[in-house]
Image: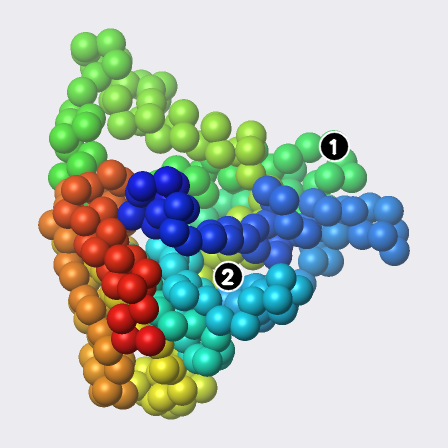
Amino acid sequence: MIGPGKPIDTNRFFVIGVNNLGGCHGSTGPSTLDPATGQPYGSGFPVVTVDDWVESQARLADLLGIDEFAAVIGGSLGGMQAMQWGITHPSRVKHVLAIASTPNLTVQNIAFNDVARQAILTDPDFHGGNFYAHGVIPKRGLRLARMLGHITYLSDDSMAKKFGRGLKKGTYNYGYDVEFEIESYLRYQGDKFASQFDANTYLLMTKALDYFDPAHAHGGDLARAFNSAKSDFLVVSFTSDWRFSPARSREIVKALLDNELNVTYTEITSSYGHDSFLMVDDHYHGVMRAYMEKVARGVGA
């Protein structure tokens, strides 16, 4: 999606990607050493919200001398941040691109997140979030959390197409070891994730998802939440995304139109579920390329 000649063309745009506070891949987070103690922040690291992340990004923009962005773009949780930019800093962003996102989590999504968190919190190696001092990581909890999460990112059709009821050894073993291809895949993904990701960061990120709800401060009225917005918007959804369904994107579109804002909406036919926004798809990339061409021309500025 990003690079020379790609939909977000780095020959035309200067692109900034940020590692959010609380993360574990470059930003200050729970695994970072607290200068006051010389030990990792661990459970002492504060809960952060989408609003916090947007404010930290605005401070970065100040440091870089950027008064206004041509566009702020994000998928899923990144789409929440893009929308928050449009709400909190309307004069600093011309275009907001919210892809495979939602105005808030459904109750089912909150439930999935809590089950994933409980897998981590109840892992004996979690040690209340201060597992660093014990020289361990809560691998079992992280593994289960990732396996559960990964299921929600896919669609039934994509899982059936990729794995079906395929068996690793071609026959039933009538036991609890890996038998089906999907079991092998999920366990591989869980093990890989557990070796790369910080447990406390996982907790923080899922909580940020749960708390995002710009309409909450406006009596549940999403249109009122977007009352301050001035940007043009592109909202993209995917037909098979049952986690952040097209219906949720249409809620966003309606709230924006209620404020008489310029909105482009597209619903992409895809079988990949929530992960669709990460896939190479000609239609999806074509939409992004066309809209970014509009951004480059300054249309609607």
Q: Residues within 10 Å of mark 1 (few under 14, many from 20)?
A: few
Q: Could you say where residue 185 lies in the image, as x and y percent from the top left?
A: 33, 26
Q: Could you say where residue 34 lies in the image, as x and y percent from the top left?
A: 80, 52
Q: Which amino acid does label 2 sit on?
A: Lys
Most foreground residue, 6 or 166: 6
Give the residue number, with chain letter if any, for mark 1.
Answer: 135
Compared to 159, does 270 lie above or below?
below
Q: Can residue 67 be seen in this view?
A: yes
**Left or right of 62, for residue 41:** right
Q: In which quadrant of the rendered view does residue 108 lie?
A: bottom left
Give the residue number, with chain letter if any, for mark 2.
Answer: 207
Most foreground residue, 235 or 144: 235
Cβ atoms under marks 2 and 1 closer than 8 Å: no
Q: Could you say where residue 174 lies in the image, as x and y percent from the top left?
A: 26, 17
Q: Is residue 109 visible?
A: no
Placement of the C terminus among the 4 image quadrants:
bottom left
Q: Residues within 10 Å of mark 2 (few under 14, many from 20)?
A: some
Q: In which quadrant of the rendered view does residue 154 lie?
A: top left
Which residue is painted at 55% across and 33% down in the image? Answer: 196
Q: What residue type is labelled 1?
A: Gly
Most foreground residue, 105 or 28: 28
Q: How far apart are marks 2 and 1 (CA)?
A: 25 Å
**Left or right of 183, for residue 240:** left
Compared to 21, does 166 lie above or below?
above
Which residue is painted at 53% across and 49% down in the image? Answer: 202
Which residue is painted at 46% across and 67% down in the image? Answer: 69
**Left or right of 35, for residue 2:** left
